[in-house]
Image (cartoon, helix red, strand yellow):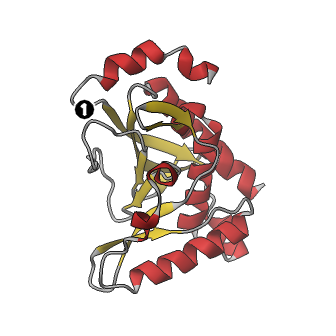
Amino acid sequence: MIGFERRRDRFDFFDRMESPAVNLCFTLDVPDFRPWCKAQGLAPFHVMLCAVLRAVLKVENFRYRIVDGEVIRIDRLVPSFTVMNQHGDLNFAQFDWSDDVREFVARGQAAREQASSMTELNVKYRTMSPRDAKDQVFVTCMPWLDFTSIQHPMASIATPDIPSFAWGRFRAGPDGLQLPFSVQAHHGFVDGWHIHLMGRQVAEELAAIIR
């Protein structure tokens, strides 16, 4: 991991802090992919999710994790995201990755239906080993809100190595769509520049999907 070794001193600096998390909310510009989704019969949220997770794999700094005190780089992702059940309560959905966008969306929708039909909290993630749990990123969408900040909960304030992403309500932009987008990650791995690269890569992945 040559990329990480170049910034190991930054990692050591931030990792000693009580909270090494960095959290930025910004306006993300993306192409208007909704007409394509409608023509293809695909849910825009799941297409957006696919683009975000593909972008995570492209921007290496978002692939670093901490396991047993050592930094590793993950090579795969387990998609997971929040849903709302029939009582308006949060639940978690999780499914297996697919490189094919249509299969990805189908699996995501099946996971959403399963989690949203449950009244109890879905704790499928607890069956994962500590190492396998690092293959996740945490995703939430709040399409009702044009938010300007967000604070994600963390299991331990000292180890925010699994990135969290959130986005809100779409609105028309000068070149497509704009939406509030939040990125939270370990500052030892990720700086503002990498968050910028992440946003740009999400837009590129969406453009590639609809071409």
Q: Residue furthest left?
A: 18
Q: Which percent across, then down, holds residue 89?
A: 27, 76
Q: Is residue 40 above or below residue 198?
A: below
Q: Residue at x 32, y 59 (%)?
A: 145
Q: Is residue 67 above or below residue 17?
A: below
Q: Residue furthest right?
A: 211
Give left or right: position of 209 versus 166: right
**Front residue (pair 100, 204):** 100
Residue indicated by mark 1: 19
Graded by Cα atoms within 10 Å as few (under 14), some (14 to 19) or many (20 or more), the crowding at tag 1 reads some
Position of the C terminus, as image quadrant, is bottom right
Give left or right: position of 98 versus 147: right
Q: Quadrant of residue 124?
A: bottom left
Residue type of the residue flagged with mark 1 = Ser
Position of the N terminus, as image quadrant, is top right
Residue 31 in view (yes/no): no
**Front residue (pair 46, 92):** 92
Q: Which percent across, then down, holds residue 90?
A: 31, 71
Q: Residue at x 31, y 75 (%)?
A: 121
Q: Which percent across, then down, holds residue 70?
A: 46, 30
Secondary structure at badge 1 equals: loop
Q: Quadrant of residue 184?
A: top left
Q: Quadrant of residue 87?
A: bottom left
